[in-house]
């Protein structure tokens, strides 16, 4: 490993977006390194391969290089370490490598390049046809529990830089662009993207791979998770009061969110391929859920006592004998992926589950999968504030009632908005809900062990 690779081997696993938490890093290799802007050799895009046991993942690092005296306090938190300068920079004195996402004097170039629709050699900057992009704006990095890194430029744009790279066009760009073409009111308008070619290990072919996506910044947006959490907090402050009577009832919002979700599903089904799964294909889908369950039990033994009950829910999906319409869906739908603006709900982050390949995320699925994701999120919102709460037992019934009320409202809104009636597809919905809960158990085990009780408790309720 070069000195820079050694530094990255320590730095990458500490980042929130690192997907391989809990498994030692065996090898780090810089697969490619490109200067992004002519005349700014201190800004580079690296594709870094990180080897962990049998897996190798690729990550994007926007690398900044400066002399030590040019690193001010504002960049201290972004420093990766001191390394030898790359040959094209000249000189022999060590330079400081840092995460350039935090350097507004560098990220401003990215916006300019997108505005110019520039071909920067192996890295291509693209502006969405028919749009103009304002330049000269300074960026700030959004803080929060993110799988990627999002920059906000002024109050105009967000640039989402994808950290873990999978060869191919990112579904977030693909679906957002399709919905924009359908003139959907429920997305943040895309303005452009950055891409490079990566070799797909399955086919050996180099394919255009999305590195970042530029979208309209929604100034008036409030996170759905924050709104729901506020409603739950109000309810906990009035013990014994039914959720519909407590201040800050969320059911009206949940219903409108259901309707917005149905509208997005309708537009996706018109814009992109659809299919209908017969019993055999449904059994195969159920088989995928069972395989995921086995993998989760191997990783989190606390799931083992509930495996039979989960298995029965998946088996029931395999035995449904009516056809199941499938289409492109959001794929990782929860309250943190939707924002309430002054004109209504907007859906974000159509990337799908960040832990699986782009090809898998492009697979058609039932829209009920997204419905199930959001229902799981109501469960999370209702119960996460009970973790370590002294009145945990007394508030558990309020939590259950809040989740039920908002589930019902969301499902009603979804059916009213033109989606299938979730109430009439209980077996399918239940299988998707438990499949998501199994995914969440693994997600929490890797990222937030203190929260693992939330999905585990929901799974336990199945076996009670
Ligand atoms: N266009 C936007 N306007 C305003 N806020 C946004 C926008 N896009 C993303 N955000 C904020 O950033 C958060 C993370 O964005 P998201 O696309 O879900 O990233 P990740 O895949 O890393 O989780 C969202 O929950 C939202 O609060
Ligand atoms: O980073 P992403 O937003 O793409 O999604 C991942 O992280 C989510 C947590 O930030 C995780 O969602 C789980 O926790 C949410 C509360 O923080 C909850 O609303 C969701 O229902 C629950 O699944 C998501 O699963 C994961 O893919």
Image (tube, grey):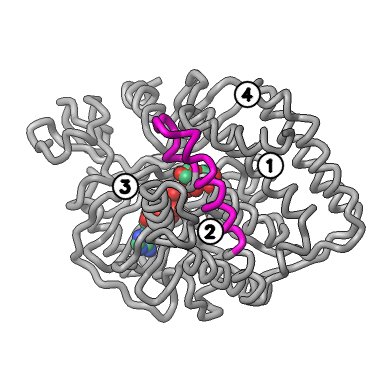
Q: Position of residue 105 (x, y in %)?
A: 17, 52
Reading the image, the residue beneath label 3 is: 35
Mark with earlier residue (1, 2): 1
Label 2 CB-ligand 1 distance < 8 A: no
Circle 4 crowding by C-alpha within 10 Å: few under 14, some 14–19, many from 20: some
Mark with earlier residue (4, 3): 3
Label 3 CB-ligand 1 distance < 8 A: no
Is 169 left, or right, of 274 in this rendering? left
Magenta residues, as a range?
Answer: 383-408
Work out whether residue 247 or residue 33 is closer to the camera in this orientation and state it.
247
Circle 2 crowding by C-alpha within 10 Å: few under 14, some 14–19, many from 20: many
SS at mark 2 in the image: loop
Measuring 30% from the left and 50% from the top, which residue is drawn there? Answer: 142
As measured in the structure, the alpha-carbon distance from the residue carrying label 3 to the one carrying label 1 is 28 Å
SS at mark 1 in the image: loop
Q: In the rendered picture of this protein, how many numbered marks are placed on residues?
A: 4
Reading the image, the residue beneath label 1 is: 202
**Secondary structure character of the magenta stretch overall:** helix
């Amino acid at each position: 490993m070069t000195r820079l690779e050694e530094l990255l081997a320590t730095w990458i696993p500490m980042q929130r977006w690192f997907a391989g938490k809990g498994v030692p890093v065996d090898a780090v290799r810089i697969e490619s390194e490109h200067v992004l802007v002519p005349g700014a050799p201190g800004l580079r895009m690296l594709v870094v391969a990180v080897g962990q046991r049998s897996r190798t993942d690729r990550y994007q690092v926007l690398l900044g290089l400066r002399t030590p005296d040019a690193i001010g306090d504002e960049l201290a938190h972004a420093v990766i370490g001191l390394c030898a300068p790359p040959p094209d920079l000249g000189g022999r004195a060590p330079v400081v490598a840092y995460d350039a996402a935090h350097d507004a004097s560098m990220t401003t170039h990215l916006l300019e390049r997108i505005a110019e629709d520039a071909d920067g050699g192996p890295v291509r900057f693209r502006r969405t046809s028919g749009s103009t992009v304002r330049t000269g704006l300074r960026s700030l990095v959004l803080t929060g529990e993110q799988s990627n890194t999002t920059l906000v430029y002024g109050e105009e744009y967000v640039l989402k830089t994808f950290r873990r790279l999978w060869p191919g066009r990112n579904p977030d760009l693909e679906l957002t662009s399709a919905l924009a073409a359908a003139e959907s009111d429920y997305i943040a308008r895309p303005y452009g993207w950055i891409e490079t070619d990566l070799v797909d290990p399955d086919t050996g072919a180099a394919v255009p791979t999305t590195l970042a996506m530029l979208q309209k910044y929604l100034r008036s947006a409030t996170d759905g998770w924050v709104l729901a959490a506020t409603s739950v907090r109000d309810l906990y402050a009035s013990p014994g009061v039914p959720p519909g009577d407590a201040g800050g009832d969320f059911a009206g919002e949940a219903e409108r969110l259901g309707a917005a979700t149905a509208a997005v599903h309708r537009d996706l089904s018109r814009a992109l391929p659809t299919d209908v799964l017969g019993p055999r294909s449904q059994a195969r889908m159920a088989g995928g859920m069972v395989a995921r369950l086995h993998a989760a039990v191997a990783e989190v033994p606390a799931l083992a006592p509930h495996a039979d009950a989960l298995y029965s829910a998946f088996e029931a999906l395999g035995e449904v004998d009516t056809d199941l319409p499938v289409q492109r869906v959001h794929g990782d739908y929860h309250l943190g992926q939707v924002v309430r603006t002054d004109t209504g709900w907007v859906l974000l982050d159509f990337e799908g589950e960040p832990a699986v390949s782009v090809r898998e995320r492009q697979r058609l699925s039932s829209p009920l999968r997204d419905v199930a994701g959001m229902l799981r999120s109501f469960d999370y919102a209702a119960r996460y504030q009970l973790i370590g709460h002294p009145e945990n037992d007394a508030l558990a019934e309020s939590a259950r009632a809040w989740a039920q009320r908002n589930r019902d409202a969301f499902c009603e809104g979804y059916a009213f908005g033109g989606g299938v009636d979730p109430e009439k597809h209980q077996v399918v919905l239940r299988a998707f809900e438990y499949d998501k809960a199994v995914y969440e158990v693994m997600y929490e085990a890797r990222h937030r062990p203190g929260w693992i009780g939330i999905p585990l408790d929901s799974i336990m309720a199945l076996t009670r």
